[in-house]
Image: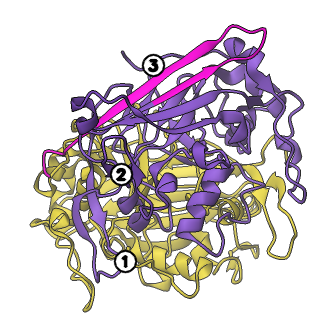
Chain colours: A purple, B yellow
């Protein structure tokens, strides 16, 4: 399998509000969601060169990590390697530099969707991310499912965005959309360890959720926002939604959330536990759509197995 | 003039320690430099699609901006448009995913240098940047000088990195370099307004400084750090150093610093004042090297003139 496009730029968003809240609570207990979150579809640039198709090995990255009580950081293999369950948006038609895409036409620029795993080294991230955001904690690998699922195929599974909770602001005019922005895509993450595979145990389900229950901003709002300053999108650009967690304990899209930052390890059928990923662990993202009167469609899968770095 | 390479990925660093201190003081008076700054060459991903050669018009971006005393943000043309004086590093030879570049070989991966203007909308930046860093405040345009100045041409102007101030930590081993990491490149920024040009007035010098007095981390440390987690660099990748301010009042590399966040407007020979850039303003970055016994070399220039956005 190959990448479906040559990726000019890869951008990652952060529209999973339950994820943002869960993670924010760990990093900033006093203020899980920043004041901008309900106005701005938060996004940041990622690394295009290290996006790979499903199946690419996940080489454990090394980097600077600093224990809370240590005087100084040390350099070594990440001890808090994690996955992030996301959808990917493939851009079809681009826009000229200086010419924003109005939200009413954003749909025309989306070629399709995929699954995306934003592999993350949480220890590197916690130490490096201020003030300019995640960098080496993320850019060692991003995996995508190899199928581009078209908006046409997903049409039967569109629905209105969930109503905003009372007290939340309405989107600014440039982000107000008329159509059905939400996608009823079912999501599942499973984990198998080397020991589980040796024992013939099936993969363990880490989470089940759905995209429409996770996204505070829609794909078209993402595209309109991204280009609202005149930034030019190009055919083949890839945009991640950010981690898609639901508000349920069963719908959390990363180990950081499931293990409460490592405080509540997951128990596996093999008797092993996991706070974060160990060498030999294999994570599989899966997605599908089903609705009465519509043909069930699969979104494909996105798999990655962790291997030790040569240096470690 | 065209871009010297097809840019796969553009990364911007933040190694100008005086700039980081000056800006940090405005955003976070209690903690201008984060605890990681003297250990980690801070960097983040930028937008490759909107990098353009010198001369490209600077279309004033619109975006969300929120006045300090306002209840909510509003969307409109940036009122705090700024430039940032940087050097750009062009990557020549790449590295494979999962294979870090050791610092002793980082030099072999640098094809050359240029000037880089990281145009910035400060009002958009202040509102959007937490927690994942600058995004729309930066990705509407990045300008580079069109010449690639080779490391060979710069060899006579290399010198040891300045000694770290007492109390600063030594770089971790993967960032320790033996050679002369600093570049004695002279830097100058000038501004001309429409009114100045009409009156036949020459451009006004906003700053004069040098790269070696500004950079806390060298180009080779940047390359080694960027790939230290296995991230793959590719031929044609562009890396910005971050804004290069010296510790002198005359060597500040952005209007944000020169005008103290807008509190001390610059007085121009036309009698005008500027806190930030107005439509018609033209910013020129220039750089050169000179030393006794060596031929003077020019690095070229990087020019951009601000124009109103169609929407404004």
The vertical placement of B188 against B90, above or below, is: below
**Residue drawn at (89%, 50%), measured in percent from left and top?**
A170
Q: Chain of mark 2?
A: A
B138 relative position to A107: left or right = left
The vertical placement of B188 against B170, above or below, is: above
| x then y, percent, for residue A304 | 34, 32
| x then y, percent, for residue A255 | 45, 50
Task: Name the mark on residue A68.
Answer: 1
Q: Is residue B33 visible?
A: yes
Question: Few, some or many C-alpha atoms within 10 Å of disc 1 (few <14, some 14-19, many ≥20)?
Answer: few
Label 3 – label 1 distance at C-alpha: 39 Å
For marks 3 and 1 on the same chain, the one whose residue lies earlier in the sequence:
1
Task: Name the mark on residue A146.
Answer: 3
**Residue drawn at (55%, 76%), measured in percent from left and top?**
B23
**Residue drawn at (86%, 27%), measured in percent from left and top?**
A179
Q: Over which residues does the magenta segment extend?
A: A285-312
Q: Which residue is mark 2?
A: A274
Foreground of the two, A238 or B66 = A238
Q: Secondary structure at mark 3?
A: loop
Q: Nearer the viewer, mark 3 or mark 1?
A: 1
Question: Few, some or many C-alpha atoms within 10 Å of disc 2 (few <14, some 14-19, many ≥20)?
Answer: some
B51 relative position to A78: left or right = right
């Amino acid at each position: 399998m190959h990448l479906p496009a040559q990726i000019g730029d890869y951008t990652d968003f952060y529209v999973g509000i339950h994820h943002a809240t869960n993670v924010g609570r760990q990093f900033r207990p006093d203020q899980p969601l920043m004041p901008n979150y309900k106005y701005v579809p938060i996004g940041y640039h990622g690394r295009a060169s290290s996006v790979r198709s499903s199946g690419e090995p996940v080489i454990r990255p090394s980097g600077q990590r600093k224990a809370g009580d240590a005087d100084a950081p040390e350099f070594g293999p990440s001890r808090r390697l994690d996955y992030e369950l996301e959808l990917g948006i493939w851009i079809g038609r681009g826009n000229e530099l200086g010419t924003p895409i109005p939200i009413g036409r954003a749909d025309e620029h989306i070629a399709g969707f995929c699954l995306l795993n934003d592999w993350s080294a949480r220890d590197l991230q916690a130490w490096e991310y201020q003030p300019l955001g995640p960098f080496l904690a993320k850019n060692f690998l991003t995996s995508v499912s190899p199928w581009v699922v078209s908006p046409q195929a997903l049409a039967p599974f569109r629905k209105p965005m969930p109503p905003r909770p009372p007290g939340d602001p309405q989107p600014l005019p440039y982000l107000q959309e008329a159509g059905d922005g939400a996608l009823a895509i079912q999501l599942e993450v499973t984990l198998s360890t080397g020991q589980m595979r040796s024992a013939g145990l099936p993969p363990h389900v880490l989470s089940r959720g759905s995209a429409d229950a996770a996204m505070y901003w829609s794909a078209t709002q993402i595209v309109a926002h991204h280009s609202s300053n005149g930034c030019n999108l190009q055919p083949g650009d890839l945009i991640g939604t950010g981690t898609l967690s639901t508000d349920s304990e069963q719908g959390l899209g990363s180990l950081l959330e499931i293990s409460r930052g490592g405080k509540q390890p997951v128990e596996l059928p093999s008797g092993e536990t996991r706070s974060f990923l160990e060498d030999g662990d294999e994570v599989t993202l899966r997605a599908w759509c089903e609705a009465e009167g519509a043909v069930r469609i699969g979104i494909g899968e996105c798999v990655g197995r962790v291997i030790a770095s040569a240096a470690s």
